[in-house]
Amino acid sequence: MHRLVEGAQGQEFHRPRARARWTAWLIGLVVGAVMVGMAAPATAGAADFIFQGRGWGSGVGMSQWGAWGAAQDGRDYRWILDFYYPGTTLEQMTDPNMSVKVKISSEPWRSVSTITQEYRQVDLTAVDVDLSLVMKDAAGEGCELMTAGNFCNVFLKEGRVFVNTATEELGPFDWIEARPATSEGRVQVELMTSSGWVSSGAREYWGAMRVVPSAEAGYLNLYNIVPMDQYLSSLGEVEYDWGQHGSRAYAPEAVKAQAVAARTYAVAQLQNRDFIHDNQWDQAYLGYFTRGYCFEERFAGIPQAARDTTGQVLTCHGSYVVAYFSAHSGGYTTAWETGSHPYLVAKPDPYSLANPPTWLDSWGPGYLWTRSISAETLSSRVRGMIGINGRSVNVGEVTRVEIVARDTDDPESHVSRLRITGSNGSAVVSGHEFRRGVGYDEIRSTLILGVTCPPSLPRGEFYDLTMYGAEIKKIVLAGLMGGYPNELFKPENPLTRWQFAKIAVNLWNQRFPESSIPLVDVPGQPFWDVAVLPGVLGDESDWVAAAHKAGLMHGVTDKIFKPYEPIRRDELATVMVRALGLQGGVEALPPGTTSFLDVPEDSPHARNAAYMMSIGVIRGYEEPEGEGTYCLHPDEPLKRMHAAVVLARALDVPKQ
């Protein structure tokens, strides 16, 4: 559940890496484009599910990149720990250098899907000092001295442990243990798996090395029994340059916070089990010498942080904290759903949202990710998940995935529930279960911002329509409006001014193709309040500029457009007259033509509204009912479904 350097489908993958408000704005732009008809660039197959989110890892407890950001902001490790584990107390252990028993993997820096903890043979060498080779059998423990520089081969025969020394074969034993004569001694280890010798070569460890038969017949397991601070000195759980003097990324307080969290996590786990893993199932423990270099010498800031915080642990109500941490929270921490740990909470994490800077990591602030997964792959991985009702999921071929609940009311918090719908029905699963089943490297965190599902309805049809279906389909097929992801139209949503600027340009171009309005990537802001996205053709500034230049739509002032305000219903009439080229009809409108009661005669939109009423495009509301008089309700936001109805009628108006 912590930092490693490789990952694979189905396994946790934690490595501090990872834009936040800016990227959220970009996502909003794409969604906005889709809902008014602009086609977003296709990067996935038509039958793919597209997941967008932020962060990397579980998001539970401390965010390593958030800790780095807080340290860069001048916060010390105590403050960082208090922020990520609220309600805890920093205390001193009674036995600060207790022994830690660690189960050794073939290559702990890799994903657990590619490594093993089962060996055909283990070679042990005494480094620098002599060691005692302790051998346990039914009669008790025996001991052989192995002088510095000598080695032995440990292998399995008939389910028991045997040892080849320089002079003889010893065994059988229940287990053997190599114990250096002094605290400065180390044991060198070489490992043979069923595939041969581990290619990364020999590794060295402080403390003792114990070899025992594996629960799987025919294999050996290897354990390192090491003092706590020496264990912490070889943890590869943060970016190594965070502890290096002179590095631009130097953040020693973040490394200290990591040391305390790692120490606390180890102590808490060892209260309930005999050992911890040296890989991503617990914490990435690499040993004193690994892959051809001395870890502690190359990355001296990590053992220094262990020494600076010797014996310090976090407690809550007298018990050790289960100090979970992950690479990046995505800007919001989450908590395990059981609620059994009051110090693991869901709350905004501004330090993660703002980090890492792009000069340090190309993913940038917030660690935004996008993953495309085929329906076939998703259906396979969903099968067998455990739903929140405790039953195995079997929905058949998946057609829809919906976010139904988050940790909080904040739409940028982590997902707690998803509904999966398929050919055999639907099921609701937790966010953590969904991520586990689909794959930790595919769904990099449960902070899923959105899911786009493959279309399953005919074009122009939507799941959330109860009225005006024919008119909406007509407008969608005409290319004037579109839907939201997951085949939703959101008919009650208001239509904004910039969105209608786009509709007006497209309506004109369909009606008058011989004099179509060009769309260009504008270099500057057409109005002060309209953002420009340089290099992107079709952003809101391009549509607003096109509508304004063509005279279809103006700003509320010379400098202000108010792009996100709903378009007024009376202004709608004016823009429609211009986009349909009906100015001649308005000019010919006889004086005293019936209009809407609530549109004043001196309004700049009055004659346009009266004309659109006269040709039946805009009808309004009969008030009082049965009296034959109508109101427009110009101050009410124009709903998307009502805009579609007006546009559908407009398409039938003949050209003048």
Image (cartoon, rainbow, N blue to C red):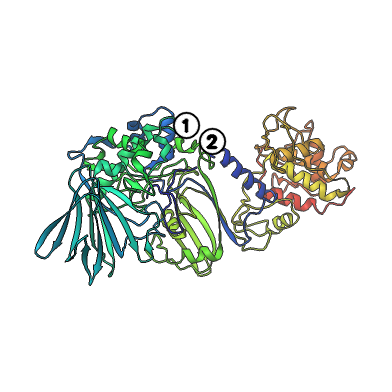
Marks 1 and 2 close (CB-CB < 8 Å): yes
Q: Quick one: label 2, few (<14), some, or many (20+) residues within 10 Å? A: few
Residue 448 is marked as none
Question: Residue at (28%, 44%) from the top-left corner?
Answer: 231
Q: Is residue 275 left or right of residue 361?
A: left
In the structure shown, which secondary structural element does the residue marked by tag 1 occupy? loop
What kind of residue is marked 1? Arg
Percent position of residue 469, x then y: 67, 58
Q: Quick one: label 1, few (<14), some, or many (20+) residues within 10 Å? A: few
In the structure shown, which secondary structural element does the residue marked by tag 2 occupy? loop
The residue furthest front is 167
Query: Which of the marked residues, 1 or 2, is nearer the chain's N terminus?
Result: 1
Query: Residue 28 occupies which quadrant of the picture?
Result: top right
Percent position of residue 119, x then y: 31, 63
Q: Real-space Cα distance between discs 1 and 2?
A: 10 Å
The residue furthest left is 139
Residue 359 is marked as 2
Question: Residue at (71%, 59%) from the top-left corner?
Answer: 470
The answer to whether residue 67 is above or below residue 57 is above
Residue 576 vs residue 117, the one in the foreground: 117
Whether residue 594 is visible: no
Q: Is residue 99 left or right of residue 558?
A: left
What kind of residue is marked 2? Trp
The residue where tag 1 is placed is: 248
- So how many labels did they put on this image? 2
